[in-house]
Amino acid sequence: MNVLIFGATGMVGQGVLRECVLANDVERVTAVGRTATGIQHPKLRDLLVPDLMDYRKVEGELRGYDACYFCLGVSSAGMDEAKYSRITYDLTLAAAEVLARLNPQMTFVYVSGVGTDSTERGSVMWARVKGRTENALRRLPFKAVYLFRPGVIQPLHGARSKTRVYAVTYMFLGWLLPLLRAMSPRRILTTESVGKAMLAVTRHGAPKACLEPGDIYDAARGA
């Protein structure tokens, strides 16, 4: 299968990219973003898009894909709802609407977050915006849409967070994550398990659209 990855330079995206290039049934991986991944692999191609709200110049290069793994995301810290909505909702839908039109048989996997508010009416701003994004994605005419809601993720195989506060946290407390994961493997995921789970739901589907940490863990084990 042919796969698109958005956000391949972020921590989750790095893990997903690794699993895609290692998978025998993945023939082509295209990383879409403003900057190149810096990784050389026969399967991998970087597609640089300066404005991630506008795909008119690259539409011809976005056809013929079986899956899209949308791993772009930012922390809501210090943002008002309008700014966070533009980065989270508007940017995601700008890409997804184009891909649904060009690849109606595509499986679209979106990295959301545990605690997302599907009602869109809760008191937590980021959860409302994520919920609105999830709901809009589910209305698009893809073959399937899966919403991944991970909580704590342990970076493996050199994956690093680009968000400073997360990077510092992992630097000082990262040694705890293997211990916590050993005690509660269905709650503490890894970048590897998230990538494997995305490939698994693309290959075999999943019993529900919203996958919480335990569901992602199970999907990865079935990969």
Image (spheres, rainbow, N blue to C red):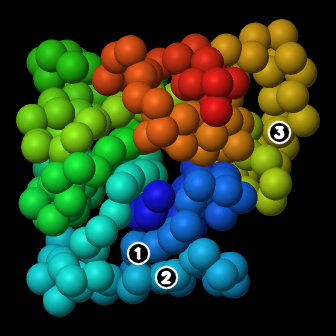
Q: Nearer the viewer, residue 174 or 139?
A: 139
For badge 1, the amino acid type reads Gly
Q: Quadrant of the C terminus?
A: top right
Question: Crowding at label 2, few (<14), some or many (≥20) Cα neighbours within 10 Å?
Answer: many
Residue 136, quarter of picture: top left
Question: From where the camera sits, is residue 216 visible?
Answer: yes
Asked if disc 3 and disc 2 are in contact, CB closer than 8 Å, the reply is: no
Disc 1: which residue: 33
Left or right placement of residue 21 versus residue 129 in this view? right
* Mark 3 vs 2, N-terminal side: 2
Q: Secondary structure at mark 2?
A: strand
For badge 2, the amino acid type reads Asp
* Mark 1 vs 3, N-terminal side: 1
Left or right placement of residue 54 versus residue 52 in this view? left
Q: What residue lies at 17% left-to-right and 89% top-to-bottom?
A: 57
Question: From where the camera sits, is residue 115 visible?
Answer: no
Question: Crowding at label 3, few (<14), some or many (≥20) Cα neighbours within 10 Å?
Answer: some
Residue 198, given in percent of the width and then of the height, sits at 51, 40
Residue 88, given in percent of the width and then of the height, sits at 27, 50
Disc 3: which residue: 174
Q: CA distance from mark 3 to mark 2?
A: 30 Å
Whether 194 is drawn above or below 3: the answer is above
Q: CA distance from mark 2 to mark 1?
A: 8 Å
Residue 27, quarter of picture: bottom right
Asked if disc 2 and disc 1 are in contact, CB closer than 8 Å, the reply is: yes
Disc 2: which residue: 46
Whether 159 is drawn above or below 102: the answer is above
Q: What residue lies at 37% left-to-right and 42% top-to-bottom?
A: 109
Left or right placement of residue 183 versus residue 33 in this view? right
The extreme bottom residue here reads 57
Tag nearer the camera, 1 or 3: 1
Residue 17, given in percent of the width and then of the height, sits at 60, 60
